[in-house]
Amino acid sequence: MVPGRALYCFAAASSAALLLRSGVAALPEGGPAPAALGQRCAKEDTASEACTGQSGEAEEVGLLQHLRKGQPSAAPLSPATDAKPEASPSVVFGVQGKNGCTGGNGDPYASGHVPCCAGLEECLGDWHGTSTWSYLCLETCHEAPPPPSGDTGLSICPTATTMGDASIWNVAAHTESCRSSKGILGTPGFKCVDASGIADTTSIFVDMNTVQDKVGCFVWETNDCQYSMKNVKQIDFDVEWFGCDNLWMAPLWLFSYPWAPVTGRQGLSGEVDLVEECAVPHVRTNLGCYNAGQGNGCVDAQNWGQGASSSGPKHLTMSLDDGGNLYVQVCAIDRTDCRQVAKYVNYIGTVYPTTDGRDNLYKFMSDVFNDEGKDGGWSGCKAVRNPSTTCKYAATNIEVTSNSNIPVFTDSTSKCYTLNANTKQQYKGVASPPAPQQQQQHEENTPKQK
């Protein structure tokens, strides 16, 4: 097995414990729990405990919920009922500590009140960006930092603002490749704003300079905006990064649940790591070709970038032709000087989410793993803890092109509709509220919107 390729694996669950990879909203008390969830379990040569379902860390459902704006709820919120089968469940799980206390990233109110373990605090917050408030046991109760003022230093993201409800992104709930007693954090995540004051609601801008404590597991996902890969012709986006050397970061990648439950092989899971610094410090596109069993039909892991800098903005295109073959190209920002960096022949007819009658949903992911390893991925990707990192990256103008005359995201009132190609002028962004001192100038220079 070639080292440095991150992959997901599927963990079995028992009635007392369930290992979770992703999700955003708390499951009501007494609500149904999914049988198992995909996990990011990067391997080298042997399966980890998490991958084989033998992990000793039990995780229990967090129950305490609050309405928007922090008002207590009269009743637990209901889980979404309109998701397609095998979409990633929206659940928040926390680690239940030993000795009668609640461990890191656990909800101390999961069953009555079980106090946090020594060294942890009860922290109330909208931890997953869904306007659903809950308690977690963390080392410190972090407050979200303000967006960076002025120029971000990245040309595709001139300025930034908080994600807000209009963003397609939310903070993920769990990861199996990064361990931290601080839980899963999203504090350095923002969305980009262009020179005219229009926010790109598909974008994600991560700036580790905005947080004092840079050690942690920082993970984001688009749990509300999942889609069928069978309907996709092309995915386009721009990407740029700086100062990300010696850091396991992945600005944009694709994930489908459940993750290869039959084979446990990344190359058959459907996972597409479009931009990933793995193995550090090399930036690659990873498809899991090393164990896909496709021979020359699957090619990936070419070093097309370095973590220190992207050397300016790049444009990436992932395309699927009529035969279900997948190709990834890296281009200059003006979409010239393109070169193919990965391919997977008969991708649609081979990977788990789209075979044997399945049409499992996909979502976008983005992360920085900067604490300690939780499985073989840490060593496989040659990751290190970098407490002084100055990494910043942006993925912007994310667009999904349909292979028919029906858009991939059909609800024109949904925030996900902005992901459809050719909707940028009408739907891609909304004006970001200017700072008070800039209000008058902004109103004079910004055209009125109908």
Image: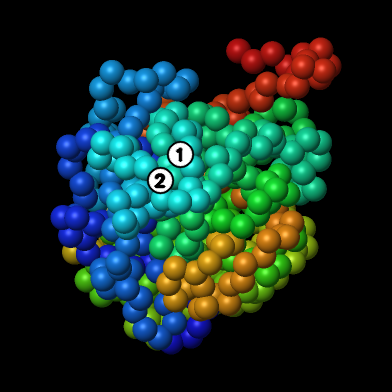
Relative to 428, residue 50 above or below: below
- Residue 182 in picture, x, y percent from top left: 51, 51
Quadrant where the N terminus lies?
bottom left
Q: Amino acid at mark 2?
A: Cys
Q: Is residue 178 visible?
A: yes
Kind of element beneath mark 1: strand
Res 347 quadrant in image: bottom left
Up/down of 290 relative to 100, above or below: below
Count of labels shown? 2
Q: Residue at x 63, y 45 (%)?
A: 188
Q: Where residue 249 sits in the image (x, y, percent)?
A: 59, 62
The answer to whether residue 162 is above or below residue 252 is above
Name the residue rendered at 44%, 45% in the picture: 137
- Which residue has dot 1 on it? 122
Label 1: few (<14), some (14–19) or many (≥20) C-alpha neighbours in 10 Å: many
Could you tell me residue 447's position as x and y percent? 73, 17
Of 250 and 45, which appears nearest the observer? 45
Q: Earlier in the sequence, mark 2 or mark 1?
A: 2
Q: Secondary structure at mark 2?
A: loop
Amino acid, disc 1 = Glu
The residues tagged by marks 2 and 1 sit, at their Cα atoms, a distance apart of 7 Å
Marks 2 & 1, CB-CB < 8 Å contact: yes
Residue at 62% of width from left, 40% of height from top?
A: 190
Question: What x and y, as percent, mark residue 237?
Answer: 59, 51
In the rendered view of the protein, which quadrant contains the C terminus? top right
Position of residue 227 in the picture relative to residue 318 (left or right): left
Q: Which residue is mark 2?
A: 116
Q: Determine which of the numbered discs, if any, sits on residue 343 in the image.
A: none
In the displayed structure, does residue 113 sit left or right of residue 124? left
